[in-house]
Amino acid sequence: MYSDSIAGRLETVRASLKEGVQLVAISKYHPKERIEEAYAAGQRRFGENYILEMAEKAAVLPKDIEWHFTGHVQTNKIKFMAPFVHTIQSVDSFHALSEINKHALRNERTIHCLLQLHVAQEDTKYGLSPDECLHLLRTEPWRELKGVRIAGLMAMATNTNNEVQIRREFHSVWTFFEQVKKEFFADNTEFSILSEGMTDDYPIAISEGANMVRIGSAIFGPRH
Ligand SMILES: *Cc1c(COP(=O)(O)O)cnc(C)c1O
């Protein structure tokens, strides 16, 4: 049923998710009042794309919010989110990972990180190719970084109406996710998150194995 309120839209989105799929409400550009509305409706996991915007919101919003960062990681700004961020979903270099580690340790925290994969056909999106991702995992000393935990992968499909293409991209990420799990995380369950799917394509992502979706417009309405 169509609803005009954030609570109503949140309920509609939740009802459409398969059991076990975690919802990150992407609140970028929306004022804190709208996040409070979603919070009042029970949402605790929020995602933002700009470090300073997220830090400003986190400072004034309830402390039990689980903040996810989904934008480009500018290493000189990591310090502003290191005290509170739960998961950084957009890690696309070992350099970024080791900088996050440094700030996590300074704050005596562990920050969950997802490696961002680039599979979409657009050049404008950040992320590692599957080969670069394997290269990082095979050659870099990431296991020594005690302040970060590589908890999974994040990816975006091409922004297109071609459902066949979107499905193919999500499927390839799932296959790669399973490969990485087997090759590098066989001995633990830390690596378990596959974050894929936004407002326009999340049902496809879920049917292709995503267990975390990042939804903005379907909850908060259009961004201005
Ligand atoms: C903005 C954004 C989303 C949410 O997009 P909607 O289409 O509004 O659901 C999800 N993931 C990332 C990385 C984003 O930048």
Image: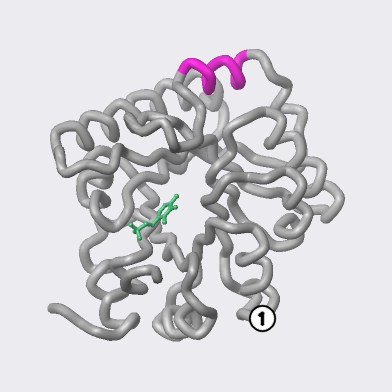
Question: Is 24 left or right of 59, judged from the image as shown?
Answer: left
Question: Is 190 left or right of 12, judged from the image as shown?
Answer: right
- Residue 132 at what x, y percent from top left? 53, 19
Examine the rendered structure and indicate whether residue 100 appears above or below residue 34. above
* Helix, strand or loop: magenta stretch: helix
Seen from the viewer's position, the closer of residues 102 and 177 is 102
Q: Could you say which quadrant of the image residue 86 lies in?
A: bottom right
Q: Could you say which quadrant of the image residue 50 lies in?
A: bottom right
Q: Could you say which quadrant of the image residue 185 lies in?
A: top right
Look at 70% across and 75% down and name the residue there: 59
Look at 21% across and 63% down and name the residue there: 16
Q: Quadrant of the N terminus?
A: bottom left
Q: What is the secondary structure assignment of the residue under circle 1?
A: helix
Seen from the viewer's position, the closer of residues 72 and 46 is 72
Examine the rendered structure and indicate whether residue 169 appears above or below residue 52. above
Q: Quadrant of the C terminus?
A: bottom left
Number of marks in the image?
1
Dividing the image into four quarters, tell me where ligand 1 lies: bottom left
Q: Residues within 10 Å of mark 1 (few under 14, many from 20)?
A: few
User: Which residue lies most toward the right here?
Assistant: 106
- Residue 90 at what x, y percent from top left? 54, 43
Look at 50% across and 61% down and name the residue there: 47
- Residue 171 at what x, y percent from top left? 26, 30
Look at 44% across and 63% down and name the residue there: 26
The amino acid type of the residue labelled 1 equals Val
Q: Which residue is mark 1?
A: 60
- Residue 135 at what x, y percent from top left? 57, 15
Examine the rendered structure and indicate whether residue 53 appears above or below residue 68. below
Q: Is residue 134 magenta?
A: yes
| Stretch of the chain drawn in magenta | 131-138
Question: Is 73 left or right of 36, judged from the image as shown?
Answer: right
Examine the rendered structure and indicate whether residue 180 appears above or below residue 51. above
